[in-house]
Amino acid sequence: MEFQTEARQLLDLMIHSVYSNKDIVLRELISNSSDALDKLRIESLQNEPLRGLWSDPAIRIEFSTEARTISISDNGIGMNRQEIVANIGTIARSGTREFLTMLKSKSEGGQPLNADLIGQFGVGFYSTFMIADRVTILTRRAGEPEAWQWESTGDGTYTIEEASRAANGTTVTLHLKPSDHEDAIHDYADEWTIRRIVKKYSDFVSYPIRLRTEKPATDDDKNDAGGGILTDHGTVIRDEVLNSMKALWTRPTSEIQPAEYNEFYKHIGHDWSDPLRAIHFRAEGTFEYFALLFIPPRAGMDLFSREGSHGLSLYVKRIFIMDDAKDLLPSYLRFVKGVVDSEDLPLNISREILQQNRQIQLMRKRITKKVLETLAELRDSDPEKYAAFWKEFGSALKEGIYQDEENREQLLGLGLFDTTEGDAKSTLKEYVEKMKEGQEGIWYITGENLGVLRNSPHLEAFRDRGHQVLLLSDPIDEIWTGMVTEFQGKKFQSITRGDIDLGSKEEKTEHEKERKEKTEEFGPLLGAIKERLQEDVKEVRIGNRLRSSAACLVADDNDMTPQMEKIMRAMGQEPPRSKRILEVNPDHPVLGKLLAMQSNNVSDPQLEDYIDLLYGQAILAEGGDLPDPAHMSRLIAQLMVQA
Ligand code: ADP
């Protein structure tokens, strides 16, 4: 049979990857086996006939130096034919295509393939082809009589045939490539290599990982093989447990080395890099639990996909209950990975019960608080690392700003935003500290593109007066700014809404007087503009925002912004049609010219063209879409010819 196209491409990348750490192959297989055992335990709780199959759960490793093979077996859930095809032959994840393109672009030009990416995508099994030129899987689904043998050389096809296996579970056998130091393929069919790798990557796996060794029997062995089996040809075979199985989270924090946290994170997070922070605590009292959480260094590919999973696993008294435990953390913290182990919940707790459980709600509150505190600490102690964190996860965290009222102020405080001052992002606290005398609100402007925002005509008066403005170019900014009104008692205020005057009280009175005069002076022109643009704007007025531009578009306080309209359209909803206000700058020479033109000849046909140009310019300056680009470009061409 053929692998699905995406799977084939991925395989290809794996085989040709120049990634040097091939040790992780073993870890991936052990982790798959551990998952398979977890699945059997859970199914055996719910499914009476499977109950008898849950005994002496273990992962076994065997190797042969002569045959150059290594195999990893488990007595877990196993797979039936259909499951093999679905789980091994295809990649059932969203975003695969983008992932592949990214991998490809990274692996070209001999760049080492970034293995974190591989791990995030859970393509663990395919990594076997980095060290093996042939892989077989012998597997039998728990509760089913047939067994299956799958085999592939990683060339894009595989075979499946019926086979036999005494009990449920899976054995993956790797026929190793020749060891080659240049390509960093160690000899994996080697006892000490295996011991080292298991100890390093899989020590916490909660099932025994047994290594089978065969050695010449010593005299002592011949008297008493001590658990080993003496063979006829003078050797002794032993199964030795390699891992400590100690749940890291139950150990006192003072005894744990940072390296142990890091390895544990890599194990549960399927990651190759160290986490940004580990959060480890024990809640005591009437409801006891351990929590060991990690802030990953990078966002997974599925952070913003609907099927994306949450990163916490729930344990009860050291026993794995479920992963993707959505109720333990709000969804905006779905990137946090880790383990929560309760002393008091029943073992058979279901997702439905979790949702309603009051204790779970309390846990969730406490865990959320801990994560937010840790992030605040990271922000204050290591701004550079925090900036990297924000770049990866800021957009997710911003969902919390409008979803989590209780922690809103804190979440706003965690935000990093672009501003009109400098290239570095600013916190809101820093913004508030820099506010000008008499400045009441937190000024912001939203848009799709930071570059466009930086040059927006709306900013002119603010620059002039030295007021800092937040430049919000993340689509989600449009959403939270529409729902959240203040930070530290300061109101968020859009600079593209309403009538704005930054002057002092006296200046404002002065400006009002001037505006009246100008409105009178430009009255006929304002009227003509309004008439020409009546389909597009609801008002034309003299404003105080502009310095060097001729015109800009502003909204009333309750109007929808053009970005919000776009977001609605992207979600398949037609927003109500809203008209904005055109603000013009009477001191701009264009306005003077137009006024002169009009008083020369009220029905000058060029006047209408110029009004269209004025309006088009205002749209272009804010990075908007012209209603009729062809018309606009004709007008510009005409203008050039006349010039
Ligand atoms: P992941 O483990 O991240 O899902 P893999 O490529 O390593 O990705 O494995 C793909 C799937 O194959 C697993 O999700 C699982 O359903 C199945 N699988 C792999 N190994 C085993 C095993 N030892 N026992 C049962 N199923 C397995």
Image: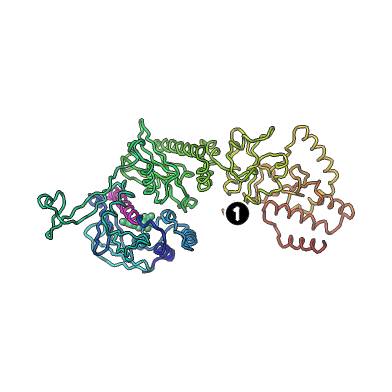
- Which residue is identified by label 1? 569
Depth check: 573 or 422 in front? Answer: 422
Question: In this rendering, would 185 be left or right of 109?
Answer: left
Q: Residue at x 35, y 57 (%)?
A: 25
Q: Quadrant of residue 639?
A: bottom right
Q: Amino acid at mark 1?
A: Arg
Instruction: Find the magenta span and give its range.
Output: 25-47
Q: Residue at x 50, y 51 (%)?
A: 304
Q: Quadrant of residue 143?
A: bottom left
Q: Position of residue 637 (x, y in %)?
A: 77, 63
Task: Check the image and report above or below for 210 versus 180.
Answer: above
Q: Check if residue 360 falls in the magenta segment.
A: no
Q: Position of residue 153 (x, y in %)?
A: 34, 67
Q: Position of residue 642 (x, y in %)?
A: 82, 62
Task: Check the image and report above or below for 383 versus 233.
Answer: above
Task: Check the image and report above or below for 468 versus 633.
Answer: above
Question: In this rendering, would 625 be left or right of 119?
Answer: right
Q: Say few, some or many: other residues with alpha carbon within 10 Å of mark 1 (under 14 / 14 to 19 / 20 or more).
A: few
**Count of number-bearing discs:** 1
Q: Secondary structure at mark 1?
A: helix
Residue that lies at the very extreme toward the top in this rendered image: 285
Q: Main secondary structure of the magenta part?
A: helix
Q: Quadrant of ligand 1?
A: bottom left
Residue that lies at the very extreme toward the left in this rendered image: 223
Q: Position of residue 366 (x, y in %)?
A: 43, 35
Q: Check if residue 40 falls in the magenta segment.
A: yes
Residue that lies at the very extreme toward the front in this rendered image: 182
Which image quarter holds the N terminus?
bottom left
Which image quarter holds the C terminus?
bottom right
Q: Is mark 1 within 8 Å of ligand 1?
A: no
Picture colour scheme = rainbow
Question: In this rendering, would 563 be left or right of 539?
Answer: left
